[in-house]
Amino acid sequence: MSEAAQHSATLGPAAAASASRGMRPAMISKVAGWLLVLALLVAWEASARLGLVKSQSWPPFTGVLRAVWDGMLTGELLGVLLSTMLRMLKGFLIGSAIGVVLGLLIATVPLLRRFLSIVIEAVRPLPIPAIVPPLILFLGIDDGLKVTVVALAVTFPVLINTIGGVDNIDGTLLQTARTFRKTRLETMTSIILPSALPTILAGMRISLGLAFVTTIVAEMIAGSAGVGYFIMVTQYGMRPDQMYAAVICLAALGYGLNWAFVSIERRLVGWDQRQDD
Amino acid sequence: MQKALHHQARRWGRAIFVASLFLAGGHAASAQSLTTLRVSTIPTFDNAAFEVAVAKGLFEAEGLKIDTTPTVGGAAGIPALVAGQLQAASSNIVTIILAASQNLRPVIVAAGDTTGDAPPDLAGLIAKKGASFKTGKDLEGKTIAVNARNNIIWLYAREWVEKTGGDPSKINFVEVPFPQMVDAVQNDRVDTAMLVEPFLSAAVKASIIDVVSWPYSAVQKRIPVAQFVMTKAYVDANPDIVGRFTRGYDRGVDWAAANSGSPEFAKIVSDFTKVPADRLKDSAMPVFVKKMELSGVEAVAALMKKHGLLKTDVDMKAMIHPSVLK
């Protein structure tokens, strides 16, 4: 009982934020946030138009917007964005699945934890650009390479958070499960997984950003598809407007992805809360 | 692979589709079917003759279906080639010599391109307008930007410094990507930069920089720049395909030479490099060649040794296919 009370208490502020009384200051700061974005874009436009930045490759923002429009009309920009997204999602799903499954196993089987911890801690900090060239030898330069690299980057935050989430489950819950003679599988699906879910989702949110960056970096290093390659080739083709068009789209996509994930997370965690209640 | 098959199926129908599956295993082609070659390319002017051969169907006329995978910088080329992911790769002469010295056994099967005989050529040493330095001696204690250390640009910049009375060890070489070099010079991040086309001609035309010197021409005429390589194992096993690849490339060289000023050539180059077609008019183009001079390659290797890039002797003759050796 005390566990359920504690749980809803930690969710308290979130619930309060969505209450009508908390809406006003939230709204104001949100508007201010967008105003800041607008101010930065105006500064960009001015710096390019007034020649404040001494550069041949600093187009005004409006020029970049035109390049976004043109790129969408011809379908070229849309095409590379979609191919990047597809690659990223594949890697994200594979990496998340591995992270969650492996994390649950490691957290519940102490022997496995001791066995794998050295490998995990050794591989985890490796920077992706450093491991792409050797991986080319085994995986080629196509999607196989990029999806693997993304999955690898995604796995660790999810894995670590899954382990952490399971470790922090209140012992009382597990003891209760034991008292009711729940099987291992039932305990896993009805207690461990739901209780660890908020932490797992937080790990997945970190991984989503990583997946995004990793996909683009991998595309820049090897292969001929996606936004990463597009950014490189337009830069070397002296088309800074098209390059920044891709960058702007990435910023928008990154924002959108995070927003979408937060909405899903809220729904899932909300469901979790109702379960507890 | 999927994309390539899709294209083929659309264009040539089921018969060729089946044939290409057969050929993907590395078997030799019968006369009327197409052999698919996966080729890593670099979206720079160096590959213009190759892209011409692709666009004008000159490889197809030789029974080759070329599936290109461009990589900026070409870092993926040789590793993927050695791993058998590709059948051919565009790479630069310094990388190829280094690969040969590491016993990766690359064989040049298309002679690629060279610099010209006189400036303006493919790369210039640029400085801020009104800069006073003219020689390597003047640059001692200063900074030269190169796109990457230990590559052809770095090598010829160092040799130019020495040739004009300076000591390369007293110069600070820093890495700046080509697209950012003009900005770096203009904003005093570096004193000079060795910049290539099309950035060079664009900056010269906008008259925002001075060209101090042309290190390539000052050091060596007709430097071999970038070539197409296959592995020795592949070349030995597929002499017929190699011959067809070389012929297709050479016909691309002929076409490029005959149509260098044409709008069609500009469009082909613009399509694969993304450089606006109108910029190409001002830009120096490499000289595309069908044969390589052994002496030219040896001169590059000698410089690599001199500047500590190459430690061992490399058999240059084994590195160049007899059909492309002059």
Image (cartoon, coloured by chain):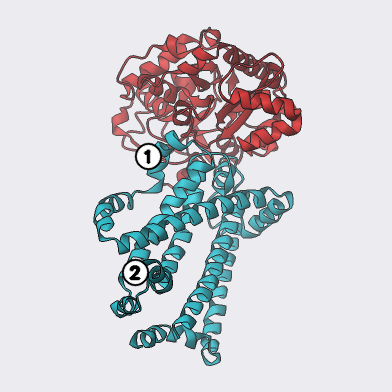
Chain colours: A cyan, B red
> Which chain is disc 1 placed on?
B
Please state which amino acid type lies under the numbered disc 2: Val
Q: Position of residue B200 (x, y in %)?
A: 55, 35
Q: Which residue is mark 1?
A: B174
Q: Position of residue A143 (x, y in %)?
A: 53, 43
Residue A198 image-quadrant placement: bottom left
Q: Residue at x 46, y 46 (%)?
A: A148
Nearer to the camera, A33 or B136: A33
Q: Residue at x 53, y 67 (%)?
A: A261
Q: Secondary structure at mark 1?
A: strand
- Would residue B91 be visible to someone looking at this image? yes
B62 vs B39: above or below: above
Nearer to the camera, B108 or B13: B13
Mark nearest the camera among 2 and 1 is 2
Q: Position of residue B74 (x, y in %)?
A: 49, 33
Residue A49 image-quadrant placement: bottom right
Badges 2 and 1, same chain? no
A130 vs B107: above or below: below
> Which chain is disc 2 placed on?
A
B289 vs B8: above or below: above
Q: Which residue is mark 2?
A: A166
Q: Position of residue B25 (x, y in %)?
A: 56, 24
Judged left or right of residue B261, residue A37 is left
